[in-house]
Image (tube, rainbow, N blue to C red):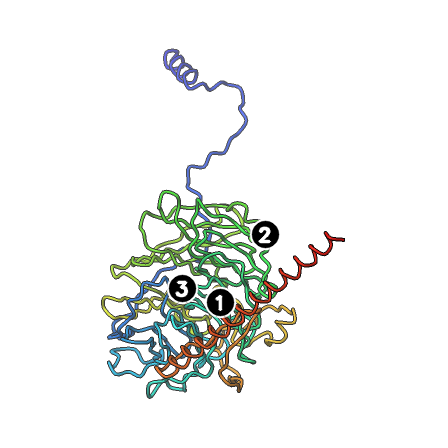
Amino acid sequence: MKTSSLRLAGVICTLGISNKRQPRQLISWRPTYRSSKFRNVYGKAGNREQCFDGIPITRNVHDNHFCAVNAKFLAIVTETAGGGSFLVIPVNKAGRIDPHQPKVCGHQGGVLDIKWNPFIDNIIASCSEDCSVRIWEIPEGGLRRNMSEAVLELYGHSRRVGLIEWHPTCSGILFSAGYDFKILIWNLEVGGPVKMIDCHSDVVLCMSFNTDGSLLATSCKDKHLRVIEPRSGKVLQEADCKSHRVNRVVFLGNMKRLVTTGVSRWNTRQVALWDQEDLSMPIIEEEIDGLSGLLFPFYDSDTHMLYLAGKGDGNIRYYEVGTEKPYLQYLMEFRSPAPQKGLGVMPKHGLDVAACEVFRFYKLVTLRGLIEPISMIVPRRSETYQEDIYPMTAGTEPALTADEWLSGMDREPVLMSLKSGYKRPCQKAFKAPVRERKTMVMNGLLESIPPKTENELMRTFFRQQDELKRLREELVQKDVRLQQLELELNNLRNNSNKL
């Protein structure tokens, strides 16, 4: 008995445990899990009957989605010879698309971006390599023949236009960014530009608004990230992102944060989180992988989920964004062997609420000429309406008119509920201003409408020749006048010396 007691005492001494009472320390060996109702969100690809097949998707290498979708229509930029065009297909008419499907084909250059009006389902804007922005009105039920006449043609950029964005709360305000390094603000109620933002030294890569549209964030090819007050064009914050080369930027709703995707100095893809009021350095930077394709960010302000989709690969990663560390909580990844060229996003009022669908992508698969819907679903057993995953969301009614916004007013979006299916009120029809197509002068900058036909081109050429001849004659006259003034000055000097 003594021997066993001595052995036990030796073991206790070896472990360093004394008979004195030690302060109690709680050590948990269980990993800490963050409670989240979106932890098990999964991606579900549509079956063959839900896909849109046989579409000649554009092969343009411009870094854009080439796709836009709303509750009624799906629009895709197509590959065409001569000029630019895009298809408009009703969302409920999936399947094999007729090769002779009517198109919107009024542009003289390739279409680079398309965006649906968030408040009127039948209105879509497009921009092109022909330096124009055009507004189209799609008839109910879709196109029955090719559409070449736009409701409104907007000319103001001197080089091709690569990006367009509708204002999130104001009807009739459109933003366009061109390769002339300028952003133009268009008032569609008067059919012309009302402001030019000229603070970029290179091509604008991305534009994003905060919730009420009072701030505009831009990423630029000059490796700078900017937060701009759009009405005045004043740059409120600016970051030099040499170590994190920013490609895409998105506002995180009302969290006063920005998310950017880009490339690190070691050429790995990165995501970074920024404070919109202090862009001196990012809050966090996280490396994603070593692939070379562009990362497209998508943010859902209702669920606070961030989706990252790589151009050229088939994966979509998604995170939950929080206000405290670790800020970006990785949830899961949707994997697919088919590479994506771009992604369209369905607005909230077009989702299937009964299936607990919180987000829906329309994926462009160029090699197969396929548009594939991908639904992000929260698994729930109950068949009742899930209020916790469908809060009040931004609706389809504008909060402001164009004149109110231009006068300095800001308002939050008009919210709507998805509980009992959304029945839209009577929409206001889009009325284009009646005006002649003419040369626009803005801030002393002359922007001419490009000629369409050979006769117009010849008239433009001879008009320019006459203008050059007039300027030469004026220059000669001024030279003669300058010489006369020099002679008079010399005479005055000689007379003064004599005196």
**Label at residue 390:** 1
Does the CB distance between marks 3 and 2 fall below 8 Å? no
Q: Quadrant of residue 187?
A: bottom right
Q: Is there any visible trace of residue 352 in the rendered image?
A: no
Does the CB distance between marks 1 and 3 fall below 8 Å? no
Compared to 473, does 307 lie above or below?
above
Q: Residues within 10 Å of mark 1 (few under 14, many from 20)?
A: some
- Foreground mark, 1 or 3, reads 1
Sooner in the amino-acid sequence: mark 3 or mark 2:
2
Query: Does dot 1 land on a helix, a strand or a loop?
Result: loop
Check disc 3 and report the residue beneath it.
380
Residue type beneath disc 1:
Tyr
Q: Is there any visible trace of residue 264 in the rendered image?
A: yes
- Foreground mark, 2 or 1, reads 2
Q: Residues within 10 Å of mark 2 (few under 14, many from 20)?
A: few
- The residue nearer to you, when weighing 214 against 490, is 490
**Label at residue 277:** 2
Query: Does dot 2 land on a helix, a strand or a loop?
Result: loop
The residues bearing labels 3 and 2 have C-alpha atoms spaced at a distance of 39 Å
Tell me if 97 is positioned left or right of 259 in this view.
left
The residues bearing labels 1 and 3 have C-alpha atoms spaced at a distance of 13 Å
Tell me if 27 is positioned left or right of 111 in this view.
right
Sooner in the amino-acid sequence: mark 2 or mark 1:
2
Sooner in the amino-acid sequence: mark 1 or mark 3:
3
- Foreground mark, 3 or 2, reads 2
- The residue nearer to you, when weighing 486 against 372, is 486
Name the spot of residue 422 as percent of width and height, x first. Answer: 48, 78
Residue type beneath disc 3:
Arg
Residue at (35% x, 79% y) in the render:
88
Query: Does dot 3 land on a helix, a strand or a loop?
Result: loop
